[in-house]
Amino acid sequence: MLILAIESSCDETAAAVVRDGCETLSSVVSSQIAIHAEYGGVVPEIASRKHLEMITPVVNQALHEAGLAMGDIQGVAVTRGPGLAGALLVGLSAAKAIAFAQAVPFVGVHHIEGHIFATCLEQPVEFPFLALVVSGGHTHLYLVEGFGRYTTIGRTIDDAAGEAFDKSAKIMGLEYPGGARIDALARTGDCRAVRLPRPLINDGSLNFSFSGLKTAMLQWINKHPVAMPSQDASDLCASFQEAVCDVLAFKTEAALRQCGARRLVVAGGVACNSGLRARMTRMAADLGVELHIPKPALCGDNAAMLGVAGNYYLCNGHASSLSLDVTATWEM
Ligand code: KG4
Ligand code: ZN
């Protein structure tokens, strides 16, 4: 089945063509990051307007790169939520319009379901598996037993990991979104230079907390202003990244032991982080667990990732009705 996938939940307008839920024929991502950076974060109204401007050219480009015409598409998959309501509405409306005009089925997919299955565009992964989802809005551990069969076994009780990266970067005066900038600076830093907390690491649960880490960063900066760029800044970034990786790795290992999973998927924008990728690779090797972390382009927001679950739902008779609405807040 040839699926056109559309993503517009936050600050990326994306469209892709995916064949049979596993082969990416094209994947186009138009980022609004430069526009929002000026404001230090995503401005919802600006995001919606930019999506509206970009959705048609991005869809057309995805079809063009796949060497297809609109009439070749056999189904449409789109992010239904969670995300910014106005932004989601642009993608959902476009998906409905295309599906209606072409008389093909469409399905609304959970954004996090998209992230989890992005890895299947590189290689298949067998059920069951444990998924660590680390993005701007999520830090969740799910036991995944099939499409639509997700059990949350751990989650953040406050900030998400990506949020912690972005807020800490902002405190340091780095441009939004700061995750990738901290990652870059950390490469030349000493991760033992600054002692930072590992929140909830010994609480016996599989939950996370990152707001205290952000506060610790603020307190440190207030006492030790750092020039940018400098060795001190790199050391602080490396220390922060190490603290986040320590907690993520510790809880993920505990979750793997607890649910006996032999496969681990790491997904979401923070899975681009070089320190986290190295840490998860070591941990999986030590535990003899099969690790799936997609290439960075598949970790951040993209539309191709929706084509995996979208294909499953459309092939199994779970198309959405044209009356489907966006779901800005949505537990998976
Ligand atoms: O999955 P994603 O693209 O969007 C959401 O669904 O939220 O994740 C975005 C998050 C941002 O917080 C961004 O700073 C973070 O992923 N991120 C990173 C890196 N690249 C992106 N965090 C740490 N290191 C990176 N290299
Ligand atoms: Zn995302």
Image: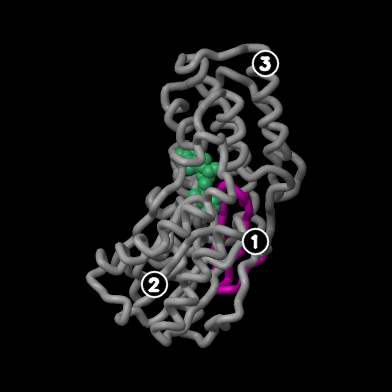
The rendered magenta stretch, by its main secondary structure, is classed as: strand
Q: State which region is magenta.
A: 128-151
Q: Which residue is mark 1?
A: 328
In the rendering, at what x and y percent does residue 303 appear? 43, 62
The residue furthest right is 203
Q: Is 118 placed left or right of 166 in the picture?
A: left
Q: Is 301 placed left or right of 162 in the picture?
A: left
Q: Residue at x 49, y 69 (%)?
A: 78
Front residue of this view, candidates 59 and 195: 59
Query: Residue 158: within the magenta?
Result: no
Of marks 3 and 2, the one in the foreground: 2
Q: Quadrant of residue 202?
A: top right
The residue furthest left is 67
Q: Determine crowd level at label 3: few under 14, some 14-19, many 20+ residues with C-alpha closer than 10 A.
A: few
Amino acid type at image mark 3: Asn
Marker count (numbered): 3
Q: Residue at x 54, y 70 (%)?
A: 109
Q: Which residue is mark 2?
A: 4
Amino acid type at image mark 2: Leu
Disc 3 is placed on an element classified as: helix
The alpha-carbon separation of the residues under discs 3 and 2 comes to 49 Å
Q: Which residue is mark 3?
A: 222
Q: Earlier in the sequence, mark 3 or mark 1?
A: 3
Asked if residue 30 is positioned above or below residue 223 in the image, the reply reads below
Of marks 3 and 1, the one in the foreground: 1
Amino acid type at image mark 1: Ala
